[in-house]
Amino acid sequence: MFAVIYRWRVEAKHEAEFQRRWHEITNEIVKHHGGGGSRLHRADNGDWVAYARWHSKDARNKAFAARQRKTTQNTPQGEGKAKLVEEVWLKITDDLLIPEKELPPSFH
C-alpha cells in the first residue's frame, strides 16, 4: 500500500471551491476507481495538504488518467484554480493511525 502527499497553493477567493471539488473528486475516486480515501489539511503557511492512500501506483495512475479524460471532455468550473506544488509518494511500512471513531475523548 502507498500513501501520497499532495500540496497545493490556492488563492483565498478559490478556497471554498477548492474544498468542495476536493470532496467531489475524492468521493468519485473512492467510488469508481478504488482509491483508499484522503484527508485534507490546512498548513500554517496557508498551503493545502492532502494525504491519500492507494493500493498501488498503477491504480492511482489509472484513476487520474480516467479523471483527466473526463475533465478534458467537460472541464468543471474551478478545475485548475489550485496549483499543485508537490506530490510525495510514500510506501506504508507501519500504520498506527487511529480511526476517527476510536480516538480518545480528548480529540472530540
Image (tube, rainbow, N blue to C red):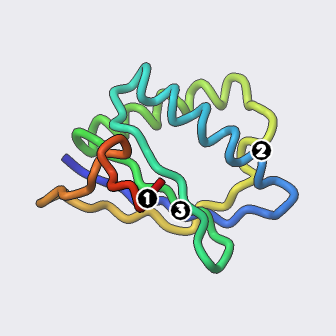
- Along the viewing direction, whichever of 3 and 102 lies nearer the viewer: 102
Which of pointers 2 and 1 lies earlier in the amino acid sequence?
A: 2
Q: Is disc 2 in contact with disc 1, using a CB cutoff of under 8 Å?
A: no
User: Residue 37 sits in which quadrant?
Assistant: top left
Q: In percent of the image, x 23 and y 42: which residue is there? A: 56
Which of pointers 1 and 3 lies earlier in the amino acid sequence?
A: 3
In this rendering, is residue 46 above or below 17? below
The furthest residue to the top = 32
Q: Identify the disc placed on residue 16.
A: none
| Residue type at numbered disc 1 | Phe
Is 77 left, or right, of 23 in this rendering? right
- Along the viewing direction, whichever of 97 and 43 lies nearer the viewer: 97
In this rendering, is residue 21 above or below 33? below
Q: In percent of the image, x 46 and y 37: which residue is there? A: 64
| Residue type at numbered disc 3 | Val
Front position among marks 1 and 3: 1
- Along the viewing direction, whichever of 107 and 71 lies nearer the viewer: 107
| Residue type at numbered disc 2 | Glu
The residues bearing labels 1 and 3 have C-alpha atoms spaced at a distance of 21 Å
Front position among marks 2 and 1: 1
Q: Mark 1 points at which residue?
A: 107
User: Residue 34 sits in which quadrant?
Assistant: top left
Q: Is disc 1 in contact with disc 3, using a CB cutoff of under 8 Å?
A: no
